[in-house]
Amino acid sequence: MIVLIKLLIAHLIGDFFLQPKTWVDEKETGKLKSPKLYIHTAVHIALMFLIVFDVSYWRLILLIGVSHYIIDAFKLTLQKKKTKRFYFFADQILHLMVIFSSYYWFYAQNLNLNFNINETHLLFLLGVLFLSYPTSIMIKLIFSKWNLSKIVSDNESLEDAGTYIGILKRLLVFVFIILNQWAAVGFLIAAKSVFRFGDLSAAKERKLTEYVLIGTLISFGIAIITGIMFNILSTYV
């Protein structure tokens, strides 16, 4: 299972941390003619080799790498502006399905690897990576159907402040849950509500209140589910 977790970590790093927005924009514009599509695929393959660090898995890595290119190519070809959210989630689900199915097809029985890092450490890293930029991007895509500038146009914020606040909040919830400190999670939710109460009262806008409430519940919900999944999976490794 340690190799499977490493492949998932490589996917998160390659798709979210090592793919700048300029690459995404260029791929959406140039589609199959965009060099960034092929560079992105090469980065994924290189990351898998680097993180797995065992050339005996070359068939598995190449299969996942080629599949990643095919899935991305179909996504870029088919998606429109109105269907961008759908194809983002479909793209990620297909990538994960390929990783899981390919791994169990080739190496389901081969788990005897001598690494100092165990599965629990890698599961923790996987959870941390997922709760940072990938979750931020998913929440932004969910909210892309609403125009925040129309909801509140006279209240400016620091650039990317919401992204970093969300990342820190989800990481704290994740850590609290794996430490079985549910009371701390409740305290964090209460503290977030207190800090936002003044803004919402001042705005006196129902839409802004609903916007903040939905975003908060989604963010906390994803972090809580990730923490629970970590606790469940760590008992099997």
Image (cartoon, grey):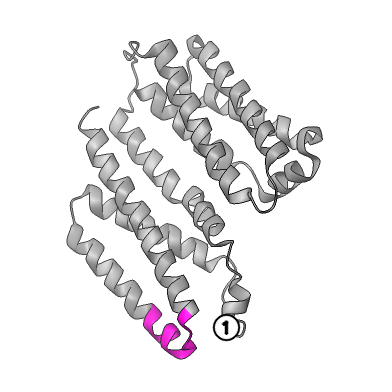
For the residue pair 132 and 29, the one nearer the viewer reads as: 29
Q: Amino acid at mark 1?
A: Asn
Instruction: Determine which residue is flagged by label 1.
Output: 155
Residue 233 at x, y percent in the picture: 26, 34
Camera-nearest residue between 14 and 108: 108
> Residue 74: x and y, percent?
67, 32
Query: What residue sits 58% from the left and 50% below the top?
Result: 85
Stretch in magenta: 196-206
Q: Is residue 9 within the magenta segment?
A: no
Instruction: Find residue 31 and report its image quarter.
Output: top right
- Residue 221's place in the image compared with 11, above or below, is below
Image quarter where the C terminus lies is: top left
Q: Against 144, is 18 above or below?
A: above
Q: Quadrant of the N terminus?
A: top left
Tell which of 157 and 28 is nearer to you. 28
Q: Main secondary structure of the magenta part?
A: helix
Decide if residue 10 is in sight here: no
| Residue density around tag 1, few if under 14, some if 14–19, many if 20 or more, within 10 Å | few
Task: Work out whether residue 181 or residue 222 is closer to the camera in this orientation and state it.
Answer: 222
